[in-house]
Image: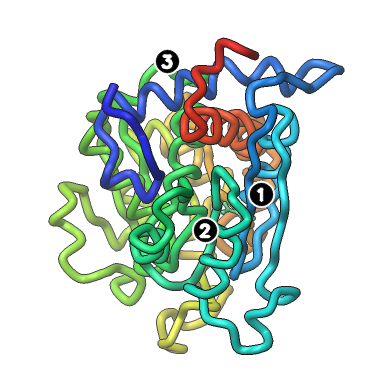
Amino acid sequence: MRPLKHLFGIADLDREQIEYLVNLGHSFIDINRRSLKKAPTLRGKTIINLFFENSTRTRTSFELAGKRLSGDVINISASTSATTKGESLLDTAQTLAAMQPHVLVIRHSLAGTCELLADYLPHTALVNAGDGAHEHPTQILTDLLTLKQAWGSPEGKVITIVGDIAHSRVARSHLLAAKKLGYTMRVVAPKTLLPSKIERYGCEVYNDFDAALPGSDAVYLLRIQTERLTDSCAFPSIREYHEAYGLNAKRLRAAGPDCIVMHPGPMNRGVEIATEVADSAKSHILSQVEHGVAVRMAVLTTLCGGTGEEA
Ligand code: CP
């Protein structure tokens, strides 16, 4: 396999690397389910989580992943760091890198943050934990592990992704992964929440959710990213958005009996997803959360030069 120095995005990974990380993540699931959740894989390794945007799932799972593999993990939030005193992103990152961590995990609103910093931090592996509306590679690896558990392989399947595609790094990373792994993405949104030229990713594009449902193997919901929304007229109201683009039990039935439901979180019940669907047996949302820890164990292990054999 081509060695991995950083994890910037799905765009930089080839099929072999994606499958390697998903399979390694698969091998870590059992450690997380044991009563004694500890393996020596990252002993002596230091991981710093540097988050400039809020997070529940990604930050916690990177922390658990590092700690369960015996690494030393430090968490830093922008709100409690010296960035509040005017320190730049580059100075903050160089300061942390001077403390010799092996891995710096970064979430930032700026697309391309990790690529930008990489030239200045030659001795630190960088992981993109979400950069603006650009990419969220570990979320997609998490989803692929969930699909591996559900289907064996996503190849030939149809995933219908619905919601705020324009601001979604998850959607963009999935579109890139679909091409590499041979699954179809159906993209569903009002025109105001679709990026221009989305067809260039080779996806099917719908404005009508009901038309996209038949033949879907999975429906993947996205929240409306109000923090990135500049157009207050993107849709008329939450109620009307839910009526047109919310997944309820009736719509899920229209997709077919084997269709599964996914969401990267955080979800807004009553907006993009009805509670009856979120809590149904078709929902794999909490499996995605569980697999997030295993996949991040795989990413940290690989970037620290391990193979997972130690675990
Ligand atoms: N899916 C995801 O990135 O969730 P958080 O924002 O809670 O990390």
- The nearer-to-camera label among 2 and 3 is 3
Q: Residue at x 67, y 88 (%)?
A: 85
Where residue 57 is drawn, which disc sits there? 1
Q: How many marks?
A: 3
Determine the quadrant in which ligand 1 lies. Answer: bottom right
Q: Does label 1 point to a residue whose CB lies under 8 Å from ligand 1? A: yes
Nearer-the-camera pick, 36 or 281 = 36
Q: Earlier in the sequence, mark 2 or mark 1?
A: 1
Q: In the rendered structure, which amino acid carries the disc numbered 1?
A: Arg
Secondary element at image label 2: loop
- Tags 2 and 3 in contact by the CB under 8 Å rule? no
Residue marked by disc 2: 246
Residue 64 position within the rendered picture, expressed as x and y whole percent measured from the top left: 72, 38
- The nearer-to-camera label among 3 and 1 is 1
Image side of residue 14 versus residue 262, left or right: left
- Cα gap from disc 2 to disc 3, whole angstroms: 28 Å
Q: Earlier in the sequence, mark 3 or mark 1?
A: 1
Q: Residue at x 37, y 19 (%)?
A: 153
Residue 125 position within the rendered picture, expressed as x and y whole percent measured from the top left: 46, 46
Residue marked by disc 3: 152
Image side of residue 12 versus residue 293, left or right: left
Q: In the rendered structure, which amino acid carries the disc numbered 2?
A: Gly
Residue 63 position within the rendered picture, expressed as x and y whole percent measured from the top left: 70, 44
Q: Residue at x 70, y 20 (%)?
A: 40
Q: Earlier in the sequence, mark 2 or mark 3?
A: 3
Q: In the rendered structure, which amino acid carries the disc numbered 3?
A: Gly
- Tags 3 and 1 in contact by the CB under 8 Å rule? no
Where residue 200 is drawn, which disc sits there? none
